[in-house]
Amino acid sequence: MSLLSRLRRLFSPPAGSSGLAEIARSTTVLETCPIRPVSAPCASALSHPERNPFRDWESMPVTIRQFTLRDIVLDQPLMTLLHAGHPVADTAYVQDPEAVRNLRLRPADVIRCAPFKGMTASCVDHWASNFYHWVAHTIPTLHVLSRAGRPIRLVLPEHMHPWQFETLELFGLTGDAHIRLQQGRQYAFSALDYITFVNGSADFAVSDLSRDAYSRLRQAAGATTPSAGRRLYIERGSSANRHVPNEAELAGALEKIGFERVHPETLSLSEQIRLFSDAGMVMGMLGAGMANIAWCQPGTLVYELVPSHHINPCFAAMATQGGLKYWADVFETGAARENHTDEAAIPLPVADILDRVRELVALLPDA
């Protein structure tokens, strides 16, 4: 099965369920995302181009919409909406289709939310604590909402990280009206707005709204100077998913040739934004930390190592969207099934990766 076919299957809603367009009181088209080829460095200067699964990649054409809904219920466990007691198919972001089909109102779990003089909006998916999902889905949503010129009541997770609170501050969206979702409950709203960034619609698209949101946060965080050309390696370290046995060996070798070893989770959001805005080259393995390329300035070179059991073009899309130069190489992991969590059983080919890094560094303006 091709990569595109796998992605379409992943994001296909369960059959027989209603969709947002069918139930919306009103619909606003926010943006139409065009097809764009990946912005690769000079491939003719690189050996073994066949190792890059995205060298001929193109972004998906997507339309981003804002739906105004009435008499809607949000199920916290699945972060899926229900209307007239039935699930709204295209809000079930990467959920088990059987679980969505069986989703119904649970009257004992329902919390009825008071009407609000302004706009109430859902802005997170069920992986709200994941940095990539917050950057790709929530930040563009907050950008759109913050420009609405109306009071905003956000529907947010119960437990939030400091960088999530900091995001709200940078957008000027702090306040006491927001709703914090409790585990296992369902929330009934007389009115709710839903923007399709939240359901992953733009994960493989090139969105001007997303790019504008990231640029706005760069300015708010004080990252306004030209890039300093720093070379950054995002170290996964003790990350729970996709652990690689000899990553420390690679990180140490990169440090010897001028790379800084970065652990983004130890920094505030503003510190991450300023650091990656300073980068001339960013390297890392597929993972949430790579979402920091959103803060890179146009022309920055991004080199991603992609595990063979989870070939995902989300960062190819983010790099192309930001005007970055992007290259990827697949590394064999020995994992038996396609998924986003398994550890690698095969060590990284450190010597081959360093050879590739030298080729890419030679393409930098200051090389």
Image (tube, rainbow, N blue to C red):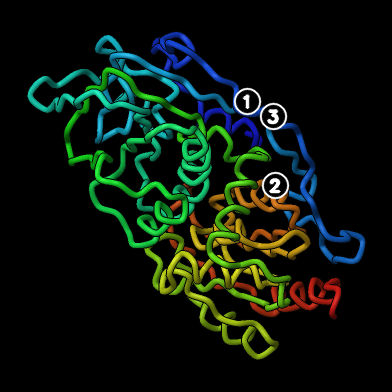
Q: Amino acid at mark 1?
A: Thr
Residue beneath the point at 50% across and 71% down: 271
For residue 61, the mark is 3
Query: Could you tell me the amino acid type at mark 3?
Result: Pro
* Residue 317 picture location, percent across and down: 66, 46
Provide the secondary structure element on which disc 2 rests: helix
Image point (37%, 63%), residue name: 240
Q: Quadrant of residue 325?
A: bottom right
Q: Is residue 195 visible?
A: yes
What is the secondary structure assignment of the residue under circle 1? strand
Is 137 placed above or below 283 here? above
Q: Which residue is mark 2?
A: 321
Relative to 338, residue 329 above or below: below
| Residue shown at the point (37%, 33%) measured from the top left | 122
Q: Earlier in the sequence, mark 2 or mark 1?
A: 1
As drawn, the residue found furthest toward the bottom would be 256
Q: Mark 1 — residue?
A: 63
